[in-house]
């Protein structure tokens, strides 16, 4: 090791020792200052049994601890004296009123005796009841206070479709339920959230809750749809749904009202059976013949003339006079009639589809479907076939009409008419 390295090591040791010593000196000095500043200069009156001596008049900066014992006794004495005076005043007042009433009755009796010496009864017009004089009428002197009304009463009618499709629970609070708590509950439901609807009780009906608006509902009903075309909810799903809103109720100190899960599962099983029986989608196809595939431009021209509208997903849709979709038309070949490619594409056929439970007045819609398919086949030189690529006959169309009639009758009997809001939710 060189002399330079040894010198550096020694220098480092000296510097470290100097810094350490300086820090110790600083620490000792600050400790002495602190002890001097916070040193107790007088006896703590709270820790002493004896009363502290009176403070000198000139020591105005020292705090004088208050003494409550003497003050409490004085206050108690004054309170007893006040109560005694009040009681005596009440007694004197009662005696004075009673004396005046007795004198008034004696004077009236003497006057009546002088006026009617033969009778001692008082006429209704002149009689005065003692209790009317002694007691003031409450209705004349006090204002009637009505109990505070809270807008959390459930309307008689349930939200649209809830009785047929949903499991329902109510959050009931004395104050408007914050939407942030409702959003937190929805986030806990993950994939189930798209089946959940929130309704607020407003006067005698339910209105959808707008989570972006200010909170205004004291009663919120959360409903979850039991059955869709994708399937039925399981018991675990309903438990998850209920627990999410139980946590929400605990956070906002609200009560929770809900139906039994087991009963709702029975309703769901019956509803799923009905859904499977009524879920009918009818299609008629027009396929190309020897003349070759259909040109996309010709299909579009015919469809727009018939009232169809091309959507960005490559499907033509036909609406009724109320704007509801009745018939859709799709290409047999992928990727469909995409607007940006329709000029150059061709197809070997198209299918017109009637989603039976989602269309009202279905028999009329079916007849319109048949007429449009036939017209397209004649225009394009194609053939009209069913889903099995078999030629469609009049007897076959009559059988389809009979089946459709049964489906619509079944839906009406269930209280879920085709094309109605409940059916649109169920068959989505």
Image (spheres, rainbow, N blue to C red):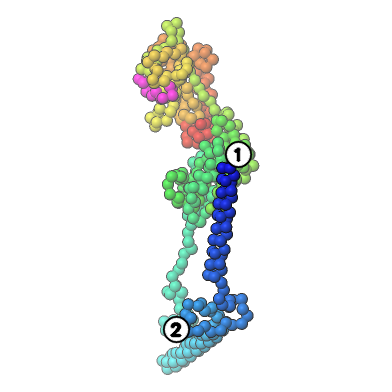
- Asked which quadrant contains residue 316, the reply is top left
Foreground residue among 68 and 415: 68
Q: Which residue is at a point 51% across and 39% down the rendered structure image?
A: 161
Image location of residue 180, percent across then percent down: 49, 47
**Category of crowding for the residue at label 1, using alpha-carbon neighbours closer than 10 angstroms: few (below 14), some (14–19), many (at least 20):** some
Foreground residue among 239 and 143: 239
The residue identified by callout 2 is: 127
The residue identified by callout 1 is: 237
Image location of residue 327, percent across then percent down: 44, 24
170 w.r.t. 110: above or below: above
Image location of residue 317, percent across then percent down: 42, 24
Image location of residue 253, percent across then percent down: 55, 54
Of circles 2 and 1, the one toward us is 1
Confirm whether residue 245 shows in the render: yes
- Asked which quadrant contains residue 192, the reply is top right
Does residue 308 belong to the magenta stretch? Answer: yes
Q: Which residues, given as a range, are shown in magenta?
A: 304-315
Foreground residue among 211 and 217: 211
């Amino acid at each position: 090791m060189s002399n330079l390295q040894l010198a550096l090591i020694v220098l480092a040791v000296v510097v470290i020792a100097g810094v350490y010593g300086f820090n110790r000196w600083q620490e000792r000095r600050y400790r002495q200052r602190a002890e001097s500043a916070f040193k107790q200069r007088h006896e703590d009156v709270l820790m002493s049994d004896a009363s502290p001596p009176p403070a000198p008049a000139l020591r105005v900066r020292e705090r004088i601890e208050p003494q409550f014992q003497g003050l409490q006794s004085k206050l108690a004495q004054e309170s007893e004296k006040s109560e005694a005076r009040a009681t005596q005043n009440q007694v004197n007042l009662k005696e004075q009123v009673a004396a005046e009433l007795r004198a008034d009755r004696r004077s009236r009796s003497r006057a009546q005796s002088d006026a009617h010496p033969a009778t001692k009864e008082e006429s209704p017009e002149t009689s005065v009841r003692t209790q009317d004089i002694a007691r003031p009428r409450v209705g004349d002197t006090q204002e009637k206070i009505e109990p505070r009304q809270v807008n959390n009463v459930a309307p008689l009618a349930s939200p649209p479709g809830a009785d047929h499709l949903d499991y329902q629970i109510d959050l009931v609070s004395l104050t408007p339920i914050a939407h942030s708590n409702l959003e937190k509950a929805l986030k806990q439901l993950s994939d189930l959230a798209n089946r959940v609807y929130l309704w607020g009780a407003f006067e005698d009906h339910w209105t959808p809750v707008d989570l972006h608006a200010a909170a205004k509902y004291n009663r919120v009903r959360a409903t979850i749809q039991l059955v869709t075309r994708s399937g039925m909810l399981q018991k675990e799903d309903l438990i998850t749904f209920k627990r999410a809103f139980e946590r929400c109720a605990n956070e906002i100190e609200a009560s929770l009202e809900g139906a039994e899960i087991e009963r709702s599962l029975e309703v769901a099983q019956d509803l799923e059976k009905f859904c499977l029986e009524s879920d009918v989608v009818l299609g008629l196809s027009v396929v190309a013949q020897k003349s070759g595939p259909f040109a996309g431009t010709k299909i579009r021209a015919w469809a727009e003339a018939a009232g169809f509208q091309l959507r960005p997903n490559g499907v033509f849709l036909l609406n009724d006079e109320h704007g509801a979709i009745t018939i859709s038309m799709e290409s047999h070949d992928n990727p469909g009639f995409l607007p940006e490619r329709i000029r150059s594409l061709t197809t070997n056929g198209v299918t017109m589809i009637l989603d039976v439970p989602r269309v009202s007045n279905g028999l009329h819609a079916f007849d319109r479907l048949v007429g449009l398919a036939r017209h397209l086949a004649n225009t394009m030189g194609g053939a009209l076939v069913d889903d099995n690529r078999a030629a469609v006959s009049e007897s076959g169309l009559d059988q389809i009409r009979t089946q459709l009639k049964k489906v619509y009758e079944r839906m009406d009997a269930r209280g879920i008419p085709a094309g109605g809001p409940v059916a649109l939710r169920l068959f989505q």
